Amino acid sequence: MKAVPISFCLNGHPVSTSIDSDLRAIDLLREGFGLTGVKEGCGRGECGACTILLDGRPVNACLLLAAKLDGCEVLTIEGLASADGTLHPLQSAFLEVGAVQCGFCTPGMILAAKSLLDTCPDPSEEEIAYALSGNFCRCTGYSKIIKAVRLAAQEKMR
Amino acid sequence: MARYITPHSLAEALQILGQEEHCLPLAGGTDLTLLVRDGTVQAECLLDISKLPELIGVQEEGGEIRIGPCTTLADVASSPLLPAALRAGASWIGSPQIRALGTIGGNICNASPCGDTLSPLLVLGGRFRLRSASGEREIPAEAFFLGPKRTILTRGELLVEISLPLTRSSSQDERRSAFQKIGGRGAQTIAQVNLAISAYWKEGILRQPCLAVGSAAPTPIRIPAVERILEGQRLDRELIAQASLRLAAEIRPICDQRASDRYRRSVVQALFRDALASLTGQEAYS
């Protein structure tokens, strides 16, 4: 028997399930709900590939017990585009600037950047770098990622 | 597998903590999640206290600043009520993701010698309120830490409040503070050494300086010998040089995978000069 009943809002939809107390959020999201945009890199809260937004704040789904999702609002990369498929300005900007190479870090990068733009609509390069300091990219060298976040901010403000 | 309990009030949490044999309080879980899952830490019951309103928030009350232990590191880092050294310490821990979950109480109760809020709490006159179902005590931050990962918390006891004395009044200058840290990289790094200082600063002279260093002994430590050197003296190059050397001699660093003891004794002096510059508003002290 799974010991812990939880209910939360996942990408805009209410969900309920029962889980083991030591299950991680990343495992529930990937294996329970099929949301494989939540990537597992280091599994130790260092690389940020598994970043999701929990009540609007970026957190590492690999360090989060799934039981802690109870009562929260959870956003993964799968819930970012509009229902009709229109991309979020950050997604469009990442494509336009070429801020994606292998793509493994991209969902986490975009969600960390979304949390920044939601609280700071016109961030400086320094503010962007600070907000993304928990997300590692081993391909791009970061400059295009920062450029994409700047572009998305400008698009959003238009 | 551990049971997962989410208490509805602090009173209920304390009652459960008193009754259960192997019950672990869980705050943000950024450290504990890994330890529980790999079996390093064993618990029959996880008590998730992170959403108890009694344990969250920063308030000014009764001549002091009170911090709920489940206040996240992100909220500590951005609270305008808190002194510079504590905000800086919190803002240097981990990443935005870690700070959004991790709490100041977790950083304290983990009792790692390198915890970045600990040396600030030591120089800011921090006091911890510990409560159990049967009683309560309040102790100075310095008395809390016994060794790496060891504290004076007894079974059934929970850290329920962190308080700092208010240091400003109309007749008094404000106590200033500063924090410095060095790790293997700029962000998302564990301190090889961290250092916090607080003092009154007027006309080139430091009064009542408090200095503490982390990752340089089995617990974060105050350095009274250096505080005595600085007290009431004009802060010039000679005094800083004398104080830096004494600081390097006073700490008891270990040599581990993060840094050698020699490096720590050397770099602590640079951190000290940078912290002094930050506290006094100078560009740099060479």
Image (cartoon, coloured by chain):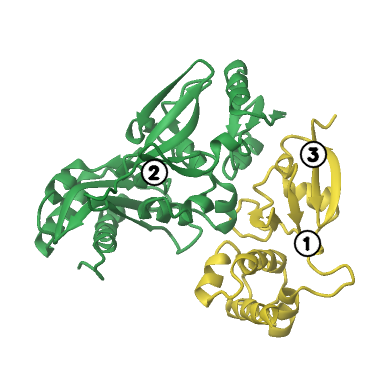
Vertical relation: B17 (above or below) B210: above
Question: Please, what is the three-letter code of the amino acid marked with disc 2?
Answer: Leu
Residue occupied by mark 1: A37
Q: Are marks 2 and 3 on the same chain?
A: no
Chain represented in yellow:
A
**Disc 1 to disc 2, how far (Cα)?**
37 Å
Vertical relation: A9 (above or below) B280: above
SS for callout 2: helix
Q: Are marks 1 and 3 on the same chain?
A: yes
| Between marks 1 and 2 in the image, the one whose residue lies nearer the viewer | 2
Question: Please, what is the three-letter code of the amino acid marked with disc 3?
Answer: Ile
Question: Please, what is the three-letter code of the amino acid marked with disc 1?
Answer: Gly
Q: Residue at x 81, y 69 (%)?
A: A81
Q: Residue at x 69, y 57 (%)?
A: A53
Q: Chain of mark 3?
A: A
Quadrant where the N terminus of chain B is found in the figure: top right
Q: Chain of mark 2?
A: B
Residue occupied by mark 2: B118
- Give residue A141's position: percent from left, percent from top: 58, 76
SS for callout 1: loop
Is residue A107 at least partly visible in the picture? yes
| Between marks 1 and 3 in the image, the one whose residue lies nearer the viewer | 3
Q: Residue at x 43, y 37 (%)?
A: B162
**Disc 1 to disc 3, how far (Cα)?**
22 Å
- First-in-chain label (1 vs 3): 3
Count of marks, rendered view: 3
